[in-house]
Amino acid sequence: MSCFLGLDLGTSAIKAVIVDDAETLLAAAEVKLSVHAPCPLASEQDPRDWWRAVELALDRLGAEAPGAMARVVAIGLSGQMHAAVLLDAADLPVRPAMLWNDGRAHAEAADLKRLGSELAAELGVPALAGFTAPKLLWLARHEPASLARARSLLLPKDYIRLQLTGERATDPSDAAGTWLLDEARRVWSARAIAAVAIDPALLPPIIEGSAPAGRLRAGVAARFGLPPGIVVACGGGDTMTGGVGIGAVEDGRAFVGLSTSAQLFVAAAAHRPAPERLVHAFCHAVPGRWCQMAAMLNGAGVLAAIAHLLGDADIPALLAEVEARFTGPGRLLVLPYLSGERTPHDDPHARGVVFGLTPDTARVELVQAALEGVAFSLADARAALSAAGTVIDSAGIVGGGARSLFWTRLIASVLGIELRVYAGGARGPAFGAARLGRLAAGGDPATVLAEPPVLRVVPPDPALTDAYAPRIAAFRRLYAALRPEFARGAA
């Protein structure tokens, strides 16, 4: 029986899975990653740390399931989007990669926005600080020597493919997040490249995510017990591969992505830009498909930060404590904007806020308020998509946050929609990457892109939906009141 390997390069961890032809999970590994913040608004990782984490994950898979590793016939890739991975002539990183939640290029993004709505529509969304193009402008202004040394620009998952195959490439879904892609035509945008004033030779070829983009090098294969020469798919951005993993590729299929960041994603049969709503209209990771997405910079990572603040890393225990004492909306409000926010605010200066503390506030209230704050930001996301003409009546839910049935129920009630929890949904992007590998090896899209088994359907609680409506309104008023203070604090 053939096996397929999926690698997902997230912000907080590398996740790797091996599945067989029946999509049975045969082995899985996860290796944690650290993020560095050398100065205000910065968020960086060293690409070499990514590869070391991949090596450790593959070693663990080999120890757990050596037979499955020997039967792998294809590898697929998924990765965090937007980071600027600049390599020199020897393919070594010029500097640490500036990540998706790095806000230093906010002034450069503002400059690019002035180029007008027509270009924003072509590129899928107005320029935002975390995108790759504004970062390149920032580097030109603040670190010109780094940019001068660069000979190629890759996205994070593409750096991993370079180590696996020696080949440079990217796919339309990941390229979509650079603010350099003509989304409708799925090619690099000459107007955007000119606006950023970079050498087009820096950019890799664009290959569809389900197509082969190289073959595994013999030395890498021998190192990990994999067959030499197996195909490596081009892969996709993590949100889009999450959609591939649950079969969200047909027009109107929606899901909530709840990992370090969060997304509300809807597949589309055509490029449907709505830049005035900060809806991201990007390419999907499979040919002939696009998407609309409300992208939030803060998801399950907010819960991890609260757990760290409380000195308690046992997140499942914290969730169980909240669930046991839950009676409805809490007294506290949390603005979850630890890393700024994109949809609907485009505010890299926004920060996390706890509102309503009293002398008797208990830690369980703080945790519940964090869960609610993320849910309220998803309500803002649904409102942005609705204003763009996209109505969502039900959705899947994927990512690490989907492991919590309590949080899923809370989100379903806040949004007022039914949510579907899938088998393997917590590993959605890695599972989707394995599917892209299977397609690159000749798999039939009609079979490979099917919806996986639904573990449970979580309906909204109408009473909770009504109870949360005034809290969502208060959440929005609190942000509106504080936005000027966020800007003053940054200044």
Image (cartoon, rainbow, N blue to C red):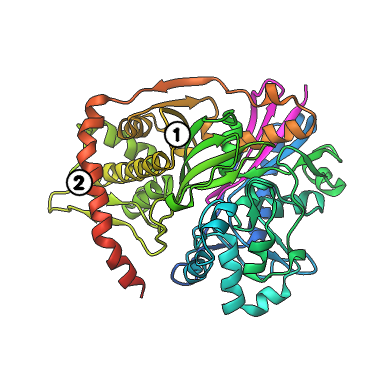
- Magenta segment range? 1-28
Above or below, comparing residue 141 to residue 430 in the picture = below
Circles 1 and 2: CB atoms closer than 8 Å: no
Q: Which of marks 1 and 2 is nearer the N terminus?
A: 2
- Quarter of the image where the C terminus is located: bottom left
Q: Residue at x 48, y 20 (%)?
A: 455
Check the image and name the residue furthest to the left.
Answer: 359
Image vertical order of residue 377 relative to residue 66, above or below: below
Q: In which quarter of the image is the N terminus?
A: top right
Does residue 358 appear left or right of residue 88 in this picture? left
Residue indicated by mark 1: 402
Q: Label 1 sits on what residue type? A: Ala
Residue where numbered disc 2 is placed? 362
* Residue 424 picture quarter: top right
Query: Which quadrant of the structure image shows residue 463?
Result: top left
Considering the whole magenta stretch, tell me its main secondary structure: strand
